[in-house]
Image: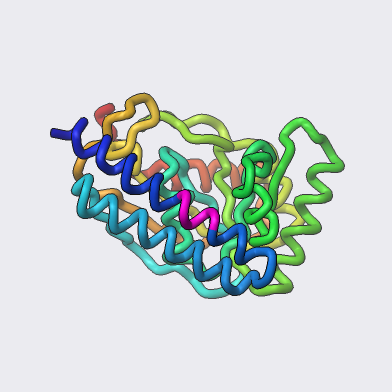
């Protein structure tokens, strides 16, 4: 049954996603505001499909502050990358530059204001990322980063990428860590999705200005809090 549900979800969600991307691409040429509306609709569409086709529900524990902060999120599946647009207002998301090369989607994402990073770009890349992040702060947009750098298998706790600490130091912003356990329903290593509850746990705000070792330790611990009892 899980396999049947997964196939149906993939057909319905990605079919609808294609339409959303086309509309977002067209809208991005004329109006960023329209594109923002389409992106939020896309996020809600994913939640709808996950709930009614896969039997996946979403639970959020904690409070998301409405002020300039750096949100650091655990990354176990593609689900949270789309879902965040439901509860963040126009987020500036830090993502790998390869995603910007996807036809149509990449153009729309740049117009939306995603912050693309080339991990092999060195100091110049970091400066570009910093400039874009500072502009996002001026525009009162929340900045979202997946500090582990990529999707990880459920229960894995890889070290944080160096770019996170650099961004934290230069932006001088507090950090709000967010744990998520989406991998138990939408695992990286399997094409079959499972019903259940995906939980977000909003951690306590961590102040700006901490030493690198301390901020990395605290964020790493907070975003992995839901994995401490992972059985897979």
Q: Nearer the viewer, residue 212 or 193?
A: 193
Is 151 above or below relative to 179?
Answer: above
Q: Main secondary structure of the magenta part?
A: helix
Residue in the image at 45% along x and 46% along y: 223
Residue lying at the far left in this picture: please name it: 1
Left/right of residue 178 with respect to residue 193 in the rendered view = right
Percent x, y for residue 201? Answer: 36, 55
> How did the renderer colour the structure?
rainbow
Say whether residue 207 is visible. Answer: no
Residue in the image at 81% along x and 50% along y: 128
Q: Quadrant of the N terminus?
A: top left
Percent x, y for residue 40? Answer: 46, 65
Span colored in magenta? 18-22
Q: Residue 33 occupies which quadrant of the picture?
A: bottom right
Residue in the image at 34% along x and 43% along y: 182
Residue in the image at 29% along x and 49% along y: 198
Q: Residue 161 occupies which quadrant of the picture?
A: top right
Percent x, y for residue 226? Answer: 33, 43
Q: Quadrant of the C terminus?
A: top left
Q: Nearer the viewer, residue 104 or 5?
A: 104
Left/right of residue 43 with respect to residue 6 in the rendered view = right
Is 5 above or below relative to 41?
Answer: above
Count of number-bearing discs: 0
Q: Nearer the viewer, residue 120 or 7?
A: 7
Please check the rendered image and state whether residue 221 is part of the magenta-colored stretch, yes or no.
no
Percent x, y for residue 85? Answer: 48, 61
Say whether residue 47 is visible. Answer: yes
Left/right of residue 17 with respect to residue 216 in the rendered view = left
């Amino acid at each position: 049954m899980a396999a049947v549900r997964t196939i149906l979800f993939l057909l319905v969600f990605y079919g609808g996603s294609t339409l959303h991307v086309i509309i977002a691409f067209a809208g991005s040429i004329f109006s960023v505001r329209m594109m923002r509306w389409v992106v939020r609709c896309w996020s809600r569409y994913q939640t709808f499909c996950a709930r009614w086709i896969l039997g996946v529900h979403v639970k959020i524990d904690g409070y998301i502050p409405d002020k300039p902060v750096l949100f650091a999120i655990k990354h176990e599946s593609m689900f949270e990358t789309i879902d965040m647009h439901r509860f963040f207002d126009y987020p500036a998301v830090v993502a790998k530059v390869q995603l910007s090369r996807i036809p149509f989607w990449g153009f729309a994402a740049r117009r939306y204001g995603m912050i693309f990073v080339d991990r092999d770009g060195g100091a110049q890349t970091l400066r570009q990322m910093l400039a874009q992040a500072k502009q996002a702060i001026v525009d009162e947009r929340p900045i979202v980063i997946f500090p582990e750098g990529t999707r990880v298998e459920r229960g894995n706790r890889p070290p944080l990428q160096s770019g996170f600490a650099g961004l934290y130091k230069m932006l001088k912003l507090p950090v709000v860590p967010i744990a998520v356990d989406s991998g138990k329903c939408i695992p990286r290593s399997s094409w079959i999705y499972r019903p259940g509850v995906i939980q977000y746990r909003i951690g306590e705000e961590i102040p700006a200005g901490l030493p690198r070792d301390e901020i990395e330790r605290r964020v790493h611990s907070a975003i992995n809090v839901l994995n401490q009892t992972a059985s897979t």
